[in-house]
Image (cartoon, grey):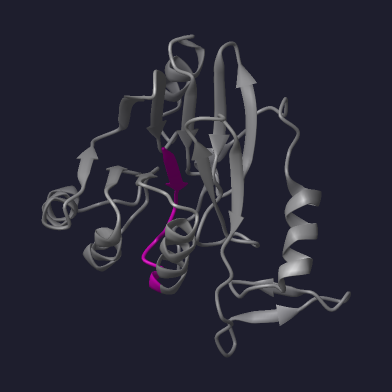
Amino acid sequence: MRIGVVSDTHDRGEAVAEAIRLLLAHDVELILHCGDIESVETVQLFKALPTSFVFGNWDKDRAKLASAIRDAGGTFHDSFGAIELAGKRIAWCHSHERHQFRQLEHSDFFDYLFYGHTHVREQHRTGRTLVANPGALFRANPKTCIVLDGVTGELKPIIVPVPLKPGAAGIAANGSVCGEGTVGSAAAATLLAATAPSPTAPLPANPDGQSKPA
């Protein structure tokens, strides 16, 4: 079984739709969402695949989101979720509740722990647990999600290209696109490889410094 992991969609419909299309192309059967959904409209885009959500710090109206998730055929958890698939224990959370996140990470109980909130794709190992952030579909360049192969245990990053909108991006001195637009596939692949932290990289020091999306 292949599982898709996304986070920090922040009501960005185009990015979400493209991510789901790519996950379907990778034969994903289940999506885990690590929080900061923000809108009912975003939830509705996940009808194409069974999706299990946790709530993030910008998911303000949780009752409305929970109702939308039920209507879309998904499931939801408040602050973290946990499942067992193919003999592997998997947890996911948003990570803004730092004490809880550290407990999950250092419990030596889970095989995988996925988290969001920082908008930075990374992975590292703590004991038996492979801890990974899929990146974000908002305020991230490139925008990314990941696929977990339940048989091989491989984590594969997926770049999610989103068409540029007028005035949504600038051009850096080296000619690369900056901002909320997309980058070419070759440039994105280079950037992804260049910016990916090493498997032993520490967590960002202050993920709670996240500002509210525009």
Q: Position of residue 195 (x, y in %)?
A: 76, 49
Q: Is residue 83 left or right of residue 110?
A: left
Decide which of 4, 138 is in the foreground and name it. 4
* Visible residue check, residue 204: no
| Residue appearing at x 31%, y 58% in the figure | 38
Q: Quadrant of the C terminus?
A: bottom left
Up/down of 13 relative to 198, above or below: below
Q: Quadrant of the N terminus?
A: top left
| Residue appearing at x 55%, y 27% in the figure | 131
Q: Position of residue 42 (x, y in %)?
A: 30, 64
Q: Is residue 190 left or right of residue 154?
A: right
Q: In which quadrant of the rendered view does residue 39 lie?
A: bottom left
* Visible residue check, residue 154: yes
Q: Is residue 14 left or right of residue 84?
A: right
Magenta span contains residue 167: no
Report the number of discs: 0
Residue positioned most to the right: 174
Residue positioned most to the bottom: 166
Up/down of 169 relative to 35, above or below: below
Up/down of 105 relative to 204, above or below: above
Up/down of 175 relative to 195, above or below: below
Magenta span contains residue 11: yes
Q: Position of residue 84 (x, y in %)?
A: 33, 23
Q: Position of residue 95 (x, y in %)?
A: 44, 34
| Residue appearing at x 30%, y 33% in the figure | 79
Instruction: Please give the range of residues in magenta.
Output: 1-13
